[in-house]
Image: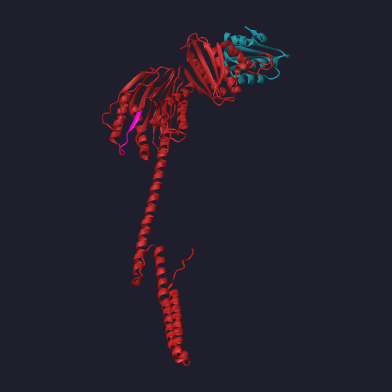
Amino acid sequence: MKAHKKLTFPLILTLFFAGLLLAGFIYALIRYSVLASAAGGEGVLETVLWEVIPALIVLVILYGAAMVVYFVRIRSSIQKAAKAIEGAVTEHKETDLGGEWAPVDAAVKKFNASAEADIRTRENKIAYDAQRRTEAGIARDMVKALSATSLPCVELDFSGAGGAERSPVIAADLFDGFYLGRRTLCFMTADIWGTGFAAARFASRVKELFRDAAHSADTLGEAVLRLNQELIANNPDELALTGFFAVFMPATGELRYVNAGSNPPVLVGKERAFLRVQPGCPLGLYEEPNLTEEYLMFKPGRCLVTYTNGAVEARDAQGQAFGYDRLFAAVKDGWDRALGADRIVTSVLEAVKGFAGGKLGDDCAVYALYYPNGIQTELMPKTSELERLRDTILDWLKDDPRKNKIFLACEEIFTNIVNHSGATTIHLNCQVEGNSFVVRFTDDGEPFNPLQVRPEGGYYSNNYAEGGMGMAIIRQIAGEIFYRTQENRNVLTIRFPVIKVN
Amino acid sequence: MKIEKTVDGTAAMLSLSGSLDAMTAGELSKAVAELGDGITDLVLDLEKLEYVSSAGLRQFALAQKRMAGKGSFSLVRVPAFVKDVLTMTGLIDHMEVLG
């Protein structure tokens, strides 16, 4: 650091001394000229020198004395004080100089106090930030764990899956799906009224409490009421939620549901509609909430998607909302791929995220119930999966006398895909359409049209490794075969005339 | 699938039961290979074979090729389902099918 050039005491004294010298010299000159003009030249210089020299001697003595006093007394005192202040600052203690330095003691004391206060403020801020970050981290982990412990429920004839897209605010939107006994699916989505750690903790309680209530209550309505009671009885953060709760029983085709202030779920399949729901009221607020258990005969050939506000309220860069039209379109897109609940959820979440440019202002949780017209399963592209393929087809066809032939055609298709397409997954969908039994294989392998396979030199040539015989079998068993590619997937549809189907 | 083996000199009979599909075709291939080159006449008894796919037929054809020129290859007691599949592929015209 550049030192400031200031007028120090010795400099002032020297300048003062020089000023006096100059004044003495001017006085001597004037005095000489006055005396010389009055009395002539003789003895005048001597007279003037006798007047000036003693004054000069006194001046030099005073100057010297002042300098000595400064260096011996004042300067060393300043240095001592500086050292004391330095020590006081480094060791955070007060100085005790006293005397003429008492104001310095007071100033150091004041300085120390303000420095300590400053440090405390900074430390508090750092601690607060660290705590907030830790809490946010824990909340994010909790929310992640909440999603991770809600696994898709996949059956041959239906599937349920959920997913969530998170925003930076940690809104802890919740989805869950689980079995209530064999083949009965219970699912929900919930929008927690709050953010951060408290919301994440509340969401995890809601999930646990609802699972418990659903397993122990006789009806869905009772389970939701029980959840509400539990939340009211112990709600330290005074949070609440809106949600949609449902139970699907494929054995009877019944869908029972309770809406607690959530947006109406959408139905997509043959139709495109909102599920008719009573508005209900949020949970965690009232002792006796106005809730209704409703039911619907949920016929195959459609899917139901329930979602939290964040989905339809997501905004793009222009501030436009995602809205219901886009939601319906995203669900329809997932439905058209006919590949299960998880694909519908992915389709909706990707559409919402893409629309918002990856920056969501609120969490968005989605749960889809996929109930297609028929059965479906995912097969690994391994020959050993033939067993599952056989079980699936034969179980579906039950007593049909052609079941072995139909399975034979399916085996030929399946082994063709395994041997030729390099697929990583093969999706099987079987359904009755009119009076036909329709099997659809969808795989993500290289584009491969088995209809174009031609045996080299006939089926009975030496080249038996080619798929010619298989295709001959398929063509003779199947009524119709169609091949198309859809979104980089091979889709092969075989239609068999049905004699009798379960 | 189960394969029972009967050997009489240079003749052998393999009795197949169950399903001969892409998953089990390898077993027949292995059984035929294990017979060795000393076998010149091979009979496949299919009475208890409930199911066959092209992967199985391919093994029939390969076994037939193995016996070609040195002896005989025949299918006996062929059930209706298997016969249908042989017919669909045209293999029935190229194999000796006895009963």
Q: Is residue A240 magenta?
A: yes
Q: Residue at x 34, y 65 (%)?
A: A106
Q: Quadrant of residue B13?
A: top right
Q: Nearer the viewer, residue A161 or A61?
A: A61
Q: Position of residue B98 (x, y in %)?
A: 64, 7
Q: Residue furthest bottom?
A: A42
Q: Position of residue A43 (x, y in %)?
A: 47, 92
The answer to whether residue A353 is left or right of residue B6 is left
Q: Chain B drawn in what color?
A: cyan
Q: Position of residue B9 (x, y in %)?
A: 69, 15
Compared to residue A330, the image places residue A404 above or below, namely above
Compared to residue A134, the image places residue A372 above or below, namely above
Q: Residue at x 38, y 62 (%)?
A: A92
Q: Nearer the viewer, residue A213 or A490?
A: A490
On the question of residue A108 being in view, the answer is: yes
The answer to whether residue A170 is left or right of residue B93 is left
Q: Residue furthest right?
A: B69
Q: Position of residue A164 (x, y in %)?
A: 43, 32
Compared to residue A480, the image places residue A369 above or below, namely below
Q: Residue furthest front?
A: A37
The boundaries of the magenta stretch are: A237-243
- Which image quadrant: the C terminus of chain A? top left
Q: Is residue A54 magenta?
A: no
Give the mark count: 0
Q: Quadrant of residue A426?
A: top right
Q: Chain A drawn in what color?
A: red
The answer to whether residue A80 is left or right of residue A230 is right
